[in-house]
Image (cartoon, coloured by chain):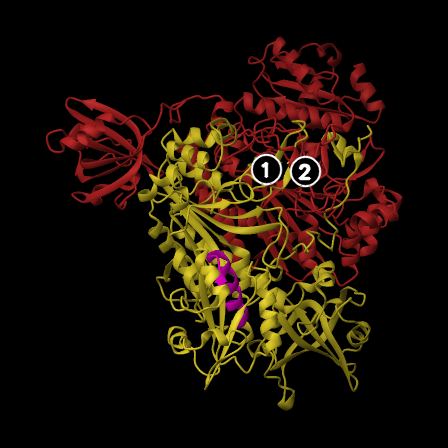
Chain colours: A yellow, B red
Amino acid sequence: MSKRTNYCGEITKAELEQTVTLKGWVKKRRDLGNLIFIDLRDRTGFVQVVFNPETAEQAWKIADSCRSEYVIEITGIVSARQGSAINPNMATGEVEIIASEIEILNAAKTTPFLIDDNETVNDELRLKYRYLDLRRPEMQNNLRMRHDITRTVRNYLDNEGFMDVETPYLNKSTPEGARDYLVPSRIQEGHFYALPQSPQITKQLLMGAGFDRYYQIVRCFRDEDLRGDRQPEFTQIDIETSFLTPEEIQDHTEALVAKVMKEVKGVEVTLPFPRMSYDDAMARYGSDKPDTRFGMELIDLSDAVKEVEFKVFQMALENGGQVKAIVAKGAADTYSRKDMDNFGTFVTQFGAKGLAWLKVDEEGVKGPIAKFMTGKEADLLAVTGAEAGDIIMFSADKAEVVAASLGALRNRLAKELNLIDDSAYNFLWVVDWPLLEYDEEAGRYTSAHHPFTMPKESDLALLETAPEKVYAEAYDIVLNGYELGGGSSRIHKREIQEQMFKVLGFTKESAEEQFGFLLDALDFGFPPHGGIALGLDRLAMLLAGKDNIREVIAFPKNSKAIDPMNEAPGQVSEAQLAELSLSVAGTMIKE
Amino acid sequence: MSKRTNYCGEITKAELEQTVTLKGWVKKRRDLGNLIFIDLRDRTGFVQVVFNPETAEQAWKIADSCRSEYVIEITGIVSARQGSAINPNMATGEVEIIASEIEILNAAKTTPFLIDDNETVNDELRLKYRYLDLRRPEMQNNLRMRHDITRTVRNYLDNEGFMDVETPYLNKSTPEGARDYLVPSRIQEGHFYALPQSPQITKQLLMGAGFDRYYQIVRCFRDEDLRGDRQPEFTQIDIETSFLTPEEIQDHTEALVAKVMKEVKGVEVTLPFPRMSYDDAMARYGSDKPDTRFGMELIDLSDAVKEVEFKVFQMALENGGQVKAIVAKGAADTYSRKDMDNFGTFVTQFGAKGLAWLKVDEEGVKGPIAKFMTGKEADLLAVTGAEAGDIIMFSADKAEVVAASLGALRNRLAKELNLIDDSAYNFLWVVDWPLLEYDEEAGRYTSAHHPFTMPKESDLALLETAPEKVYAEAYDIVLNGYELGGGSSRIHKREIQEQMFKVLGFTKESAEEQFGFLLDALDFGFPPHGGIALGLDRLAMLLAGKDNIREVIAFPKNSKAIDPMNEAPGQVSEAQLAELSLSVAGTMIKE
């Protein structure tokens, strides 16, 4: 092997007449007359290499035996392409290498799919041969962008005095939150570590330890059923600070995100990001993470339809619910009655019983519920702003159902009707979250964020008497309808933390048993503190313009949490289980 | 809360007469006459704050109620100290803050130990209240230094074109290497992920994917019994490259380490680092990670003592072993006969049967085996270079036992005799490692490094016929007697990898089952590649001048792999185990 002098994709006319040694993969081989052309690829791109049997017979012979994805090393002289041979569509299109030497460093069998961005390959095959899938320029770029993001994040935080501190992955299982991944202990029979869902308590303890500004780009683990933007393990940009207000933490986060947008995407975003209360977001967009790249806001018709004698509306209002609508501008000709039926089915998954709708034309409103509108049409059009050619879609139900169904319908319609500017990055803070949610099934309150979130000081008195009315010092950052991260002030006083555990249904004993070390820590001079965690996978996914975080993770799992390449998780030996005093499904381990 | 204007430890005369707001912990409170002095501490250090009842009565009253480790916020004016009040031993010793306001942000109970570097606290208590232990300036500095190391490493590697790629923590258990930590799968009953002992195969696959230069600062996991420089989880600076020679990888590593030494410690190290073959290191230092800060090399006496009629020597030589010695200069008066007996006991843990020794004085040699030396003294002194006042200590046994016992004795004596320059940083490459070790117990060869290490090309033919004679393209980097990291060229051809598995005792089927995905990958155009992994914990430990990696880890485990703070690993609910189809120690899980 000789020493590489250049990367393939970086050769330009600046290197003309130089002798270069390149290493890489055969992207394509073509025979043209008695010349052989090889496009040689490495991580920077590719360049054309020419083998001429008259000037380099030995090299030409070896080149003749090369196939796609062979790993080769070539030496040759950089030459200018002439006339029509110049390819303005490729970075190295003005040059080619006239090869004098070639060495085959490794051969390649025919790959199960072409290494080409234009090739459509099914996801399972891509994951099984991930090392081939990752050779595609698109995947190389996605991971390069991810690297650029983390680099920018680290530089910003390092310069702002944040300290990168590693926290344990072998942690303790706690009853709150999602399902833990467990790790059996060999030394303590019947005991288990848990992989962290986030280093939440640990980073708070670092504030108790006086580190003042902490960050970590850290893996987190949740054993949940998987979706497009979920993986068993995911990565978090984890930040915690002492003595800062929520606004100061938001300022840091904005500056950080703006720097990433500028350095990675070349996009200038306007600061500060808009703030919207949780209640407003739910009312106007039916979502706690509204996509504000388009309008189509939810319109409250509870007043306007009070007199409309449509039973569905009346019942909803009588039961303390709402009647709301969204208006799909100019969609009347796009959607047939059958399409509207489909939307009706679609909203049932969000708890709605169906979808009432009206099409507007020059003469008024048409559609299944038009007959109830007689005499109320002008009012309705005035309140909704609907015009000829529009469709009004209604939801009448409990507030949660109205929000969920119209919110989801709004997102679906925007995609179908091409209302979204793909080049826009709409950031938004959703602030003033409720502290708690009521879990009907468990018959108790659960944390909207986590049990360490600080209630609004003004609501502290309500914590015992009317917990559902308590708001939290919590805030989410939203990008284009995705929750990018969430932050809050944390509880730093023992008595408030104890009260919180009580509201969540812990006894004094069970709180002590699970979280005693944290309660103790709060006794020894704990500073006011707060922080935020941003989802790195989602951020990278959105900046790469993808809709699945698998596209920005080198070796992700499939939807069954399996890695189709190495088939993890796998079976282990009985000896391994015996050492852990474990047996599977009640089968005794034989010694 | 007001906004902090400055950090405590950074206030100097440059801020004279300015009004500042500081936040931090009460390090100490003293009453002097009617004034109260509080040393206020944050992560940067501390500053003296003065409360005067005549100018700020309210603040003085609150200050009077403050105790150690209270978290407070103060506002006041920076003033110059006068005359003897100036304290040249403290960074802020020329100033003090005349407080006008104070707010108690949180109270503190009396801490179980003083937050002071001079306080001796037992390790278990330190870990139980780690958040208090971490408040000590020394621990703050250790973690700050660790941060500085990783920052320097990342900057170097980023600038050299290395890409930070995250690899999975939920991986597959493989039979080679140390014991895996397992993670049961909920979805695939009876199947387990394994936490990676290192991302070895994964990073190789990234080379197969064309990433060319990879790095990651990554957590690794080994379920082994613990020692001072071992933890269940540890952090590795993980590097892999394509197309580079071992020398080029070593050059990068040296440049990286030199940059860390310069930026973190202000120490200029000389490049290149010395190279020593494994065989030389074992022969001269009895160690594969020799501490070269002192001499006391092993001297081969196998020739010199051939005629000495001491049965121990003769038997060792007859059995194909060696006779070697080290000379402890000037130690004859330091060590009594009882001390020498203790050394004899010490070396038995390395397989030696005892320790022969001689003291040298003006008249010749003295000691238990002096009588065998009659007539050979001059020879012995000439070969060993021993002089009056020295002790010669012998080992006569198999080569491994001689090396292990004299190597360990050499390190122990150097410490006891103060031969080590604590300010020296002696880096060393140990190269040309044997590929395999013979495991007597298992009756088969095992890898000296790992099964993916490339044999020396010149030795490839020996792989089937005389595996024990094969050397590897492997190299360790050693600092002051600690293995800092190990690297190698990896196998990139399927046939060699298959041969290697065969030598290690795999059948074709078992190799395919465990490592089939890697073997397949080697078929599809795998580049020549190699890399290195450096132990971040050890590097930080050595630069911090400590002898236990716990001192540079925020939340380490104790020697039983328990975190005494949160008591991880803990018990989990039967419901959690049932979901994983697991039972402990043969007990059936009740539904």
**Numbered marks: total:** 2
Q: Compared with residue A251, is residue B500 higher up or lower down, i.e. above or below?
A: above
Range of residues picked out in magenta:
A396-413
Placement of B305 over or under B26, stated as above or below:
above
Q: Which quadrant would the N terminus of chain B be assigned to in this image?
A: top left
Residue farthest to the front, as pictured = A309
In this picture, residue B538 sits left or right of residue B376: left
User: Crowdedness of circle 2 by 10 Å Cα count: few (<14), some, many (20+)?
Assistant: many
Q: Residue at x 72, y 12 (%)?
A: B369
Residue B384 drawn at (x, y percent): 67, 24
Q: Amino acid at mark 2?
A: Tyr
Mark 1 surroundings within 10 Å by alpha-carbon count, few (fewer than 14), some (14 through 19), many (20 or more): many
Residue reaching furthest to the bottom: A83
What's the mark number on residue A170?
1
Label 1 close to label 2 by CB (< 8 Å): yes
The residue tagged 2 is B181
Is residue B466 positioned above or below B418 on the image? below
- Rendering quarter of residue A120: bottom right
Say which element carries label 1. Answer: loop
Task: In this rendered view, identify the residue nearer to me: A409 or A1.
Answer: A409
Q: Are marks 1 and 2 on the same chain?
A: no
Q: Is residue A443 left or right of residue A473?
A: right
Q: Chain of mark 1?
A: A
